[in-house]
Image (spheres, grey):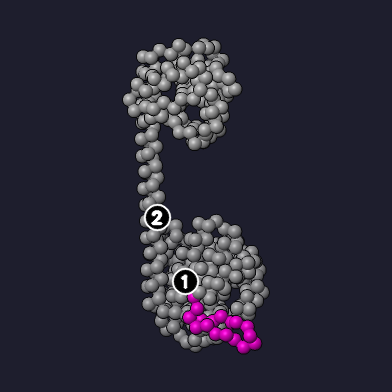
Amino acid sequence: MRILLVDDNKTNLIFLTKLVEKLPGCTAVPFGNPVDVLTAMPGLDFDIAIVDFQMPDYNGVELLTEIMHFDKYRMRPVVFVTADGDTSVRMSALNAGAIDFLTKPVQPLEFQARMRNLVALVEAQNKLADKAAWLRQEVDKAVLELRAREEEIIDRLAIAASYKDAETAKHTKRVGCYSEAIAIAYGLKPEFCSDIRLASPMHDIGKVAIPDAVLLKKGKLTEQEFSAMQRHTIAGCDILRESKSSLLQLAAEIAGSHHERWDGQGYPFRLSGEAIPLSGRIVAIADNFDALTTARPYKEAWSVERTVDHIRERAGTQFDPHCVDAFLEALPSILKIMLENLEQPVVAAHGDVNVTYQTIEYREAI
């Protein structure tokens, strides 16, 4: 236990130092000038401070006030040594943060009794602080483990969905990364941006409930088949929404809303404007961009330029205009993600690079 001693009287300082050295496990940290104390901060380390009230340059209250400007010392107990019995002096010391007084001349027996009690108190506080730090560490560890399990659940669900429609695997990964890039450009908190990257790959999990004859059909869907396909949004939301995991709840929100339109002409509930969850509005653009730039059995891949124009033109009708702005700002990041996840790159005529890659679903994109 390190005990700071501050007294401009050399004799008193030596006396207090000897008294501290008689306390088991205690080490004196003596200073004869309050200016030197402040100069040594914030590197100075002590557990308890014993400060003389009357000193040059800074009196005890002034010194304590300066000490308390440092966060690391605000919980350190401070004892004043004074011959002044004036109530106003003691009140000013208490208001500055002192917790006890020693009256000059200091009596050795009283000093040792008071300091033993104070040392015991500080040791108890330190143990509690250590335990609290340990508990925080354990809680943080448990949260990280829980998060890892949630991410694993999403990965397992994505793998399960790929058995139903093998083309969705790369698509879901790209949509997750695109959605995160748009969310970052939108200015959302990093935690949410990370969450939407993890949750958005579940946007089409409801397609496991769609009959294979509809889901895997090569030609154009009939009106009845298209209606059946639309039900994947509700099925996906139903699969995920009862989870107590906030990440899976976000995935449920996305699954149920990523085909809604800004103008209210989407499905399944014809929500419009900001009634559509922001997560769904973001994923709608990411999903649309990936679907249009991807070759399907029933269509060729669009160029990036044509796809960007398509999305820009539908700001305010199909898409949230603010999310479109964020998409355009995030486009360099999105193209980088795209290039990192190519399956079959193709260089188009006219010298423009139109990025295409073979994969996935989303027959209702156009």
Secondary structure state at the residue bearing disc 2: helix
In magenta segment, residue 350 = yes
Q: Amino acid at mark 2?
A: Leu
Mark 2 sits on what residue? 144
Residue 197 position within the rendered picture, expressed as x and y whole percent measured from the top left:
49, 65
Looking at the image, residue 214 sits to the left or right of residue 61; the answer is: left
Residue located at (55% from left, 72% from top): 336
Q: Nearer the viewer, residue 2 or 260?
A: 2
Residue 7 percent across, percent down from the top left: 50, 20
Identified by mark 1, the residue type is Lys
Neighbourhood count class around disc 1 (C-alpha, 10 Å): few under 14, some 14–19, many 20 upward: some
Disc 1 element: helix
Q: Quadrant of the C terminus?
A: bottom right
User: In this picture, is 164 found above or below 139?
Assistant: below
Residue at point 39%, 78% (across, down)? 164
The answer to whether residue 27 shows anywhere in this view is yes
Q: Residue at x 41, y 26 (%)?
A: 28
Q: Is residue 92 visible?
A: no
Q: How far, Cα to Cα, is label 1 from label 2? A: 22 Å
Q: Is residue 38 above or below residue 197?
A: above
Tally of numbered discs? 2
Q: Earlier in the sequence, mark 1 or mark 2?
A: 2
Q: Is residue 73 above or below residue 336?
A: above
Please report the residue visible at 37 percent of the width from the left and 23 percent of the height from the top: 21
Residue 173: which disc?
A: 1
The x and y percentages for residue 266 are 57, 71
The percent coordinates of residue 322 (x first, y second) are 64, 64
Q: Nearer the viewer, residue 96 or 272?
A: 96
**In the image, which residues are magenta?**
341-357
